[in-house]
Image (spheres, rainbow, N blue to C red):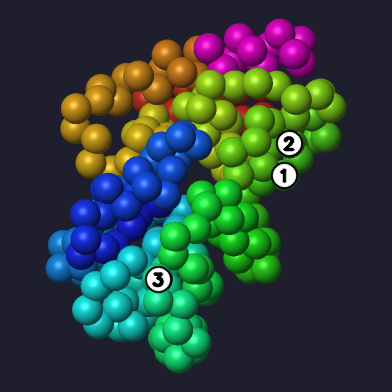
Amino acid sequence: MIIIVDDRDALERADTLGFGREGISTEGLAASDFKEWVRTAPEPELAAVEAFVLGQFDDRRFFPKIIKQRTHAPVLALNGGRSLQETLDLFASGVDDVIADPTHIHEILARIKAIKRRAGSEPAGEVSGQILVFGDGRDPEVGGEPLHLPRRERRILEYLVSNKGRRVTKGQIFNFVYGLFSEDIDENVIESHISKLRKRLRHRLGHDPIDSQRYLGYRLNDC
């Protein structure tokens, strides 16, 4: 999930940037609402955030420090005016990258991926040489061949790969795939997505690599 902070219509900005078309869940918050949330959000909610994108609002140079006190997720800023001084000021404030506005969703995802790779926390990678995910909208490779997946299933597989060997709960997966405030969607939809994903992986690999334990959650085993 990516959080967009913007005093313009942040959710409209998310649609304009094209996150939904890539199956990336987003939450748009005004600066005042975000400031309160990031200071009080519980750790499981923060763990579901892949990156923060700062749009246009007053005093945004103070926000990277607030964010980095709570999480190591990348912080990017949009620079619509493309002012060199504004870019330098944003980097000095602690943002990880500055992007021209407007921009393409694939550039944002690529920059997030590059930041995580430099930090040594890049989530995409191989699992025992059989599963390779990319985290930038591309389908995964399973058994050396591309495997086309619906967007939600692809995102679930990416999350399981990024937590390989660790058990994650249905709630954690839901927050990652659908966002933190999706009250109109039943959390149990994750069970249906995972059931379909397991069938596809079993067909390709010859076995089911996803271990599930009731009440404890899911884990991607070596495969």
Q: Residue at x 26, y 48 (%)?
A: 11
Assess whether residue 207 is covered by the magenta stretch.
Answer: yes
Is there CB contact under 8 Å for labels 1 and 3? no
Task: Please report the bounds of the magenta region as a residue range.
Answer: 196-208
- Residue 190 image offset from top left, x and y in percent: 40, 22
CA separation in Å, label 1 and label 3 = 33 Å
The residue lying toward the viewer, choosing from 170 and 158, is: 158
Residue 125 is tagged as 1
CA separation in Å, label 2 and label 1 = 5 Å
The three-letter amino acid code for the residue at tag 1 is: Gly
Q: Earlier in the sequence, mark 2 or mark 1?
A: 1
Residue 221 shows in this picture: yes
Q: Secondary structure at mark 3?
A: loop
Q: Which residue is mark 3?
A: 80
Report the side of 148 relative to 184 (left or right).
right
Q: Is residue 175 above or below residue 97?
A: above
Is there CB contact under 8 Å for labels 2 and 1? yes
Q: Secondary structure at mark 2?
A: strand
CA separation in Å, label 3 and label 2 = 35 Å
Q: Earlier in the sequence, mark 1 or mark 3?
A: 3
Q: Is residue 23 above or below residue 209?
A: below
Q: Which residue is mark 2?
A: 132
